[in-house]
Amino acid sequence: MTVSACGVGRPSVEEAAVEVAIQQTSAALAAGDVEAFVDHWTDDGLQQVFAESTETFARQSGYYVQARQWALGPPSQTEVSGTTATSIAPLFFRLVGAPRRFSMVREAGTWKIDGAELTTTDVGDARVVDVILEGSSIDLDASAIVDGDIALDVRNGTSDVHELNIITVPKSRDMAAFFAHPELEPPLPEGRSMPDGMDFIGGINRLEPGARVTVLFQQPLPPGRYVLFCNVEDPSGRPHARLGEYIEFTVE
């Protein structure tokens, strides 16, 4: 799948400097270098995007950087205004990502990421599949998926915050029972986060009310059974998926 960069013309000196900073952040992820990665962020930026302080991120989520599970795509549509700027680039975790409009700030002559918001983008030749997050369900036309070269146009049609997690599951797995009665699942072995045969391939956190975002995949999805679900808890502490907010599709 090709993600289009919509910027035109040659960037100015400052625009180029902003894009170099994002490219260096991408290189730190590719190298698994936690220290270099966090150096390109302000504390507020890390808190907004990863919900962790610099210290906490380095101690906890830095594992994912070292394991090279994050990836940052090329920047585009860069705009500079004094000591602040914005630029759009796709941020991936494992196989799943989304374009983000990164807010940049110049500190002591260095551009750093000060935050980001989810946005939409053109996806070239990939088939776009509409996904609507509703109060206790997810609306998706699975028949529209004819192969794995897809992107998702995701909209939060509610007044609540949601998320979109994506897992692969065996054909025989009863997902209704899995979400309805997680307490019946056997304990997971140490070091595992999913039961045998299931794999978390990524997701998008904190989809604000009314938000719309393009969900991207780093490569066409291989054949298999996929489940989308929201694990945000309702006021009583029940995950939305337990209330029915999940849906599946198959790539043949």
Image (cartoon, rainbow, N blue to C red):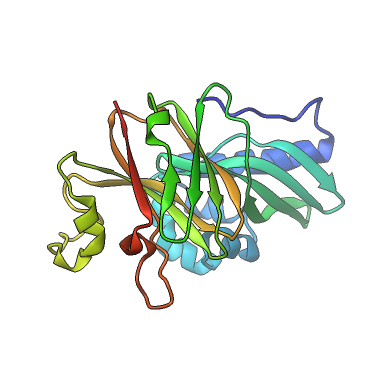
Q: Position of residue 1 (x, y in %)?
A: 50, 25
Looking at the image, which residue is at 75% across and 55% down? 105
Image quadrant where one finds the C terminus: top left
Q: Residue at x 62, y 41 (%)?
A: 120
- Quarter of the view holding residue 142: top left
* Viewer-closest of 167 and 178: 178
Numbered label tally: 0
Q: In this view, does 26 lie to the left or right of 19?
A: left
In x, y percent, where is residue 183?
Answer: 18, 68
- Between 51 and 243, the residue placed more toward the observer is 243
Residue 63 placed where, x, y %?
38, 55
Question: Between residues 166 and 44, which one lies in front from this camera angle?
Answer: 166
Residue drawn where x is 66% and y is 37% of the image: 75
User: Where residue 12 appears, x then y in whole percent?
Assistant: 84, 34
Residue 11 at least partly seen: yes
Against 20, residue 202 (above or below) is: below
- Residue 189 sits in quarter: bottom left
Residue 192 shows in the view: no
Left or right of 3? Residue 114 is: right
Q: Residue furthest top?
A: 125
Q: What residue occupies the far bottom of the structure in this picture?
A: 236
- At horizontal 76% and vertical 36% (from top left) the residue drawn is 16
In the displayed orientation, state which residue is furthest to the right.
Answer: 82
Q: Please, is residue 223 above or below residue 163 in the view?
A: above
